[in-house]
Image (cartoon, rainbow, N blue to C red):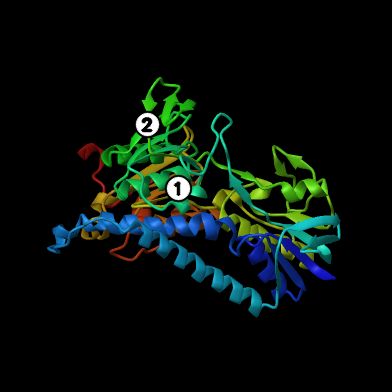
């Protein structure tokens, strides 16, 4: 009998397995597909590999400013996709080595529930004291669009393309849609993105949505908002705005839904389509926990990992989870990166915005697009939104300030290195009290 059985080896499951092994538990980790889950195999990592290529292409356009002579002659798409596969395999091997080093039993196969303390995998009965379900999520379909994996694709299908389409319609402008629009536009594809909402990246702060709108316009990515697809006849797409499009391919990027196949066998309680859990990720069955996308709290890989550690420590150490969801950063990748944490702008909050085009480092790098925006109430940072070359790293300074409730006057005393992009954070924080040092006084505007 194992101390812990974990179903799903994505960023929630395999991290939970490692933490449990560190605490001396006997662990079996069951995965029906590939180690690393969606994030490594069909999400975060492959898309970032392709985004890296897109960034290199965009950088080439700036070389002449620095006296560097180079020309872009196109992309070998199959070679790029091979690079994506090599990256995935390398990281899979890394996870495999970690699990082996931690003496975790890994079984590839689909689990079937026998009881609350026993499952069957590949005809093998496995008994356990506790179980963590980390089966993740899968791309959502749209009710009136039948995906065929060819003309109409989801984010899994698009990673299997053998060539670049001439034109692409992306349905949905969340992080997945925005990132794929950036990738394909940089690779020379004619991109149109549509959303039923009235702004791009609907969950983002208004300044982020406006920035993306402006960026897309500059890069000739067409946007059609407050629209949905009424029907598709052949390759003609009819929108609710009465516009008709004839793309080579359609990408459905309408979010993700939890993989509940395993859950239904157990009869676990659900709410809004997700597994119901308490603050320690325990389900309606006392020895079974659910982490990551399947519980619907926050669908991010880093959240799944942290929930996995917390669930394990509750099982083995009786330690209560203490995750502050207001301080978890969210990133949209591409050039420049877009990162957010905490609250968006509201009428009763202080707001300070510092543009990057006057920072020494950003001017030297010719990376002047973007800004640092901080939101505060009662002398505390409550939200931050950054558009910058290194936004995915910069945001953690402000996430830490939110989590630790560091008062703004104390942040004034922190010294940031020069020249760095992080000076934009310093200036934005100073700006909350009209003390920004590199902005003209308001009366001088």
Please tell me whether residue 231 is drawn above or below residue 153 in the rendered image: above
Extreme residue toward the front, this view:
234
Position of residue 21 relative to residue 138, above or below, is: below
Q: CA distance from mark 2 to mark 1?
A: 39 Å
- The residue that mark 1 highlights is 384
Residue under the point 72% across and 60% down? 311
Q: Residues within 10 Å of mark 2 (few under 14, many from 20)?
A: some
Residue 426, percent from left and from top = 37, 55
Q: Which residue is mark 2?
A: 246
Residue 47 is drawn in which quadrant?
A: bottom left
Is 342 left or right of 260, judged from the image as shown? Answer: left
Can residue 228 be seen here? The reply is: no
- At numbered mark 1, what does the secondary structure look like: helix, strand or loop? strand
* 133 lies above or below 103: above
> Tag 2's secondary structure?
loop
Horizontal and vertical percent for residue 254? 52, 38
Residue 59: image location, x then y, percent:
25, 57
Q: Could you tell me which quadrant the C terminus lies in? A: top left
Which of these two is toward me, 160 or 334?
160
Q: In front: 215, or 172?
A: 172
């Amino acid at each position: 009998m194992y101390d812990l059985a974990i179903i799903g080896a994505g960023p929630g499951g395999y991290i939970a397995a490692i933490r449990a092994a560190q605490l001396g538990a006997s662990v079996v980790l069951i995965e029906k597909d590939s180690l690393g889950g969606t994030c490594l195999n069909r999400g975060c990592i492959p898309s970032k590999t392709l985004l890296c290529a897109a960034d290199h292409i965009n950088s080439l356009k700036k070389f002449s400013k620095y006296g560097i002579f180079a020309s872009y002659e196109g992309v070998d798409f199959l070679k790029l996709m091979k690079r994506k596969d090599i990256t995935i395999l390398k990281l899979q091997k890394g996870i495999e080595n970690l699990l082996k080093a931690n003496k975790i039993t890994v079984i590839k196969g689909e689990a079937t529930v026998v009881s609350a303390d026993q499952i069957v995998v590949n005809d093998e009965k496995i008994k356990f004291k506790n179980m963590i379900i980390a089966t993740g999520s899968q791309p959502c379909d749209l009710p009136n669009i039948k995906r065929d994996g060819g003309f109409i694709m989801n984010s899994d299908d698009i990673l299997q393309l053998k060539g670049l389409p001439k034109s692409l319609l992306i349905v949905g402008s969340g992080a997945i849609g925005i990132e794929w629009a950036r990738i394909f536009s940089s690779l020379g594809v004619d991109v149109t993105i549509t959303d039923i909402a009235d702004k791009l990246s609907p969950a983002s702060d208004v300044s982020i949505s406006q920035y993306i709108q402006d960026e897309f316009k500059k890069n000739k990515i067409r946007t059609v908002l407050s629209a949905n697809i009424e029907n598709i006849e052949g390759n003609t797409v009819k929108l609710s705005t009465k516009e008709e499009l004839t793309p080579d391919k359609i990408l459905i990027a309408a979010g993700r839904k939890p993989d509940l196949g395993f859950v239904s066998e157990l009869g676990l309680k659900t709410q809004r389509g997700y597994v119901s859990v308490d603050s320690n990720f325990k389900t309606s069955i006392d020895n079974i926990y659910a982490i990551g996308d399947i519980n619907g709290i926050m669908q991010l890989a880093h959240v799944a990992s942290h929930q996995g550690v917390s669930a394990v420590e509750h099982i083995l150490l009786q330690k209560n989870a203490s995750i502050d969801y207001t301080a978890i950063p969210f990133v949209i990748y591409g050039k420049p990166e877009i990162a957010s944490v905490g609250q968006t702008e509201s009428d009763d909050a202080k707001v300070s915005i510092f543009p990057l085009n006057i920072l020494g480092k950003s001017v030297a790098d010719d990376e002047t697009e973007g800004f640092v925006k901080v939101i505060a109430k009662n002398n505390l940072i409550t939200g931050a939104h950054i558009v910058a070359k290194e936004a995915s790293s910069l945001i953690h300074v402000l996430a830490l300030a939110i989590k630790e409730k560091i008062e703004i006057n104390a942040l004034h005393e922190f010294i940031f290195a020069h020249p760095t992009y992080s000076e934009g954070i310093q200036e934005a924080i100073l700006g909350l009290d009209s003390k920004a040092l590199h902005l003209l006084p308001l009366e001088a505007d």
